Amino acid sequence: MKKLKVEDVMTRTVVVVREGTPFKDVVRMMLEHRVSGVPVLDGEGRLTGIVTEADLLTLEEGKVEPKHRRSFLEWLVQPGRLAEIEAEAAEVRAADIMTPSVVTARPELTVPEAAKLMLDAQVKRLPVIDEDGKVLGIVSRRDLLQPFLRTDEEIEREIREEVIFRTMWIDPDTIGVEVERGCVRLRGTVERRSVAEILVELVHRVEGVVGVEDELGYRWDDRKVKPRGPFSAPRWSENWARRGA
Amino acid sequence: MLVRDVMTVGVVTAAPDTPVKELAALMVGARISGIPVVEDGKVVGIVSESDLLPLHEGDPGHRVQVAGDVMTRKLISLVEGMTVTEAARVLQRHGVKRAPVMRGERLVGIVTRANLLRPYLRTDLEIQAEVEEAVLSGALGISPRGVRALVIDGVVRLEGRVTSARTRAILLRLVRAVDGVVDLEEHLELEEEPNGHSVQEEAERAL
């Protein structure tokens, strides 16, 4: 089970704007495409900044030319001055309002690393760029939550192939696995109690699993076998796997 | 990890008649992206940044807009005992970015996507404690003398001896799945390789 990387979860179709895109068009694109941030590209297609919902809400002194200095909130709450303010807004370009220093990610970063970066920098998205600054995609909080949101089919496949077969070395046909909305029901009979317990623990920790209904049976209870070795060997032994060999 | 471990407490709230301008100022000032709207002690809606953005475009009319005009009334809430995974699924299923956490009718916290990413931010000590207690000793019954775990910047280094290749496979899987683990460096030795074959080869032949 490999850790997911940014390139596995990022959104590859990115809504972008140019430095010269009028401010109103930036807002319109964000609303139409339902995105909360858009990367801004220069003439060569390289990333130079990003405009986010927060930028739109905090348009304030210093960010735009003096004549455009106006809290955006003012626009919201003073309808009488709308026409005048809109006329000014028409001259504002993406480059005037963007956040110029963007925290970015490389595609090979792992999901936990990207999440740390995002939370440390207090940003909601990371443009993913190559060595030349070209935008390959964008990774949002939603994308980083993908491991939690795996489909039931993906979860079932991982439990059967990776957990039951490759990790526990049990014939997958002997264990019933049903997954519904992330809840897993395990049925069947294994050799020992400790095997059933470890299987449930492994399934619990499969990404995307919400809960486990344990309906596993076992042929004998090795928890009652005492004493254990002086170095506290695993509670299950490998002998069960060799039965029938 | 559970919702109660990651939620934000001390939630900033608004009333239905709070002006939109104040909501925006609250969001900017407190660096929050959503504000639950409370009336008579009950949560009646939630206002997010996205709810304020369309106001840039449309004609606001001649009345001052208030929270009650723009809030989302569809209320999706969470409870403290839910797992983070379950909470993420609820947000996803209902297409919302945040949800209030309720104890009965009382608002006790709020969970955003950022909160749900917090398991990744666990300290090395927390990760190490879970690896040692829950995985090594708890699930596998391996003593600290058998396998040692060391965590640096989320990378877990495992050293020691395990009884079989299968124990190793189970151990690696469990450790990788611990919240906050970025990667794994494994330096484990096997105690036995019966008949010159790996246990896995034998098991696969047996199936």
Image (cartoon, rainbow, N blue to C red):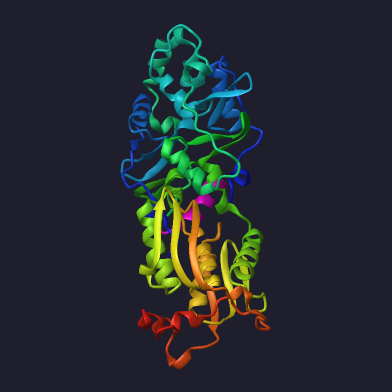
Q: Quadrant of the C terminus of chain A?
A: bottom left
Corner quadrant of residue A27: top left
Report x, y in % for residue B50: 45, 28
Q: Nearer the viewer, residue B83 or A214?
A: A214
Classify A160 as above or below A179: below
Viewport quadrant of the N terminus of chain A: bottom left
Front in this rendered view, residue A172 or B107: A172
Farthest residue toward the bottom? B195
- Give B176 or B164, whichever is nearer the viewer: B164
Q: Give the residue at x 51% y 10%.
A: B64
Q: Please determine whether, in this image, residue B90 is positioned above or below residue B187.
A: above
Residue B107: image location, x then y, percent: 62, 31
Q: Is residue A241 magenta?
A: no
How far across and down, in percent of the image, does residue B76 sit? 50, 32
Magenta segment boundaries in residue numbering: A108-121
- The prevailing secondary structure element of the residues shown in magenta is helix
